Amino acid sequence: MKTTQRLEHALAKLYNAYHNNRLNPEDCTACAVGNILDNQDSWKHLSNDHGSLQLSYVGRVHQSLGRKFNGYSPQEILQIEKVFLDACGFKTPLCHYNQKPKNPTSNDTLFNGLVAVVELLCVLDNQPNIMDYSKLFEQENGEPVYQLKAFLA
């Protein structure tokens, strides 16, 4: 499958962060966006409230100038972060009294967040969801429509 360069880079960074235990929804340098943006925290100034879709003044200026951060516009950055936090079980925008998951860095919590982010990244790039495995179970006349190639070690 042919994907965009920004999608490839984002997926690689998220994959590495997940498998190297460098993904943390409560750390703006280690959350989904933090990892996509090379573990920098300057993106947090794009909004006044973490997990909000509302651009701050700084965010609106960057958006109006057409500024991209590793290929993503300020509005897309906020969308990615909100989807990640919501899927991890946080009530957004973040606030000390809002709901949050019991264990925000558990593999299950982070995996749920990543699945939602990957789906959004694919939508943003007009790509089919690479996490959609439903085609593997499609049948026609009792036979699988698609064949799964087995990979042997």
Image (tube, grey):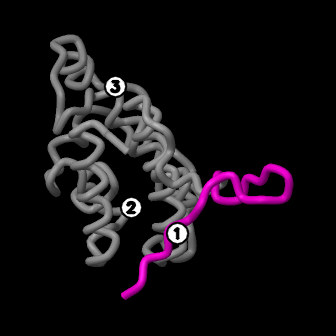
Q: Upstream in the sequence, badge 2 or badge 3? A: 2
Q: Nearer the viewer, residue 117 or 103?
A: 117
The mark closer to the camera, 1 or 2, is 1
Q: Residue at x 34, y 70 (%)?
A: 18
Q: Indicate which disc residue 25 carries.
A: 2
Residue 149 shown in magenta: yes
Q: CA distance from mark 3 to mark 1?
A: 27 Å
Q: Which residue is mark 3?
A: 55
Residue located farthest toward the bottom when viewing the structure as drawn: 153
Query: From the viewer's perspective, is 45 left or right of 26?
Result: left
Q: Position of residue 69 (x, y in %)?
A: 17, 35
Residue in the image at 32% along x and 40% along y: 2
Q: Are marks 3 and 1 in contact (CB under 8 Å)?
A: no
Residue 137 image point, x, y percent: 71, 59
User: Residue 55 location, x and y as percent?
Assistant: 34, 25
The answer to whether mark 1 and mark 2 are in CB contact below 8 A is yes
Magenta residues, start to end: 135-153
**Quadrant location of the N terminus in the rendered image:** top left
Residue type at mark 1: give it.
Thr
Q: Find disc 1 in the rendering and name its residue.
A: 109
Q: Which secondary structure class fits the magenta region best? A: loop
N-term mark: 3 or 1: 3
Element under disc 3? loop
Q: Nearer the viewer, residue 109 or 92?
A: 109
Mark 3 vs mark 1: in front = 1
Residue at 25 percent of width and 25 percent of height: 59
> In this view, which residue lies farthest toward the right?
141
Q: Is residue 123 magenta?
A: no
> Looking at the image, which residue is at 24% across and 58% down?
13
Classed neighbour count for the residue bearing mark 1: other residues with Cα under 10 Å, few (<14), some (14–19), many (≥20) = some
Q: Nearer the viewer, residue 118 or 153?
A: 153
